[in-house]
Image (cartoon, rainbow, N blue to C red):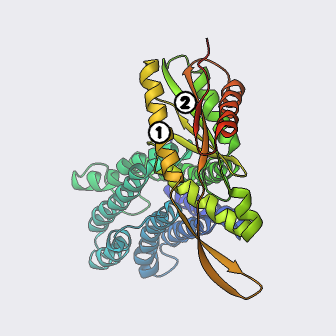
Amino acid sequence: MPTVDITTLFFVLMLVGLSISLMLAIVGKGVDNNLLIWSAAYACQGIGFMLIFLRGVIPDSLSIWFGNVLVACMFTLLAVGLLNFLHQRMNPLLVWSPIFLVALAFFVFFDQLSGRIIAGGLIFFFQVLILLWITIYHRAQLVGRGKMILAACFAFSIPISLTRPIATILDFGKIESFNSAGPLQAYTFLAIAVVSILTALALVLMQKEQAEEAINSIARRDDLTGLPNRRKLYERISELTTNRKISEFGAVVMMDLDNFKVLNDSYGHAAGDNLLKLVAERLLTCVGETDMVARLGGDEFVVLLPALGADVDVAMNKAESVAQKIQATLAEPYPLTIIDSVRNAEFTITHLSTGTLGVKVFSHPGQGREVLLRDADHAMYAAKHKQRGTIEFAPMSA
């Protein structure tokens, strides 16, 4: 079995921590504060292991006590950065108290190596559990592979943190000093070095994947209303019409607002924008969790009903029911605040605007996206031709 010099491993751990800290600081400066927090965490690790590495050269109070306090700070800062990244909060006592516990334990067991190993290992084990819990509990907020690698690193850190305390309690693999030779010490600290590197890579990957997801989300979101835009709607319809595992009916409800141009011409585009925001809010109250409300542009909206059942008559009735609910909701008065820039004053008006709807019921897999939207659009204009504020169904395809 190859042997590894423990003192050299501590030197490696110091270099790993400081190198990762520098890398995260360079990448995160002016871009992402979370990377800077994680940079501080790895700085604590690097400096902490440097102080332990200098045992006998510097005072023991710095090497033994402060070095391990900094290692505890590393775990805490990792948790703080992760919570900040997730926009979550956690009981500060759980996050910060391990630092004070390590400070107290290493003061009490300052002259007792076995006591320090057991107390420190158990506290570090608790900190790793917190990190693992944060990652797993909030996994739905994270995208991509970074979160899986991170969770694996924290899970693997659990046995690493317990190896030396258990060995000390069972008097297995005698540890007489921090740099005692032997496979137990060697492979424990080697594992720490590997996990430190993988954790840093996972953090950077997770941040990158989350940023890409945010960009993709913005590209598929309407700026004014926050609804999915045309691109997102097209993608969703294409998914439905090409999925051969689904054998039920859906519907596309296309609509535009009546009297919208009159509002814009009379009170300006700001009033029109306010109306569109209110319309978006009302449409969301008319649909279920699996449905989609999208804005095509201007005053045109589309409601996608993907799951209306396997019976065509039932699907038609459900689509009509939703369309009538939308029509009734849109017809309710809109209180709009108007800003008069000339008089530097604002006042409120009550605006009335109905919606004209065209409905296309479809089966998926079935017709393509362009055909469905075209048929719904034709039905909407047919309804306008008859009477504004009404509903028209496109004929079912043969």
Q: Which mark is residue 380?
A: none
Q: Quadrant of residue 24?
A: bottom right
Tell me whether the residue at label 2 lies in contact with that at label 1, contact meaning CB atoms closer than 8 angstroms.
Answer: yes
Q: Which mark is residue 251?
A: 2
The residue drawn where x is 67% and y is 40% is: 384
396 relative to 28 in the view: left or right? left
Relative to residue 128, is residue 66 depicted above or below? below
Residue 388 at what x, y percent from top left? 64, 44
Distance (Cα) linking label 2 and label 1? 10 Å
For disc 1, the marked residue is: 322
Q: Residue furthest left?
A: 170
The quadrant where residue 109 appears: bottom left
Report the front residue among 236 and 320: 320
Foreground mark, 2 or 1?
A: 1
Quadrant that contains the C terminus: top right
Front-lying residue, 22 or 289: 289
- Looking at the rendered structure, the secondary structure element under dot 1 is helix
- Which amino acid lies under the numbered mark 1 shown in the image of this protein? Val
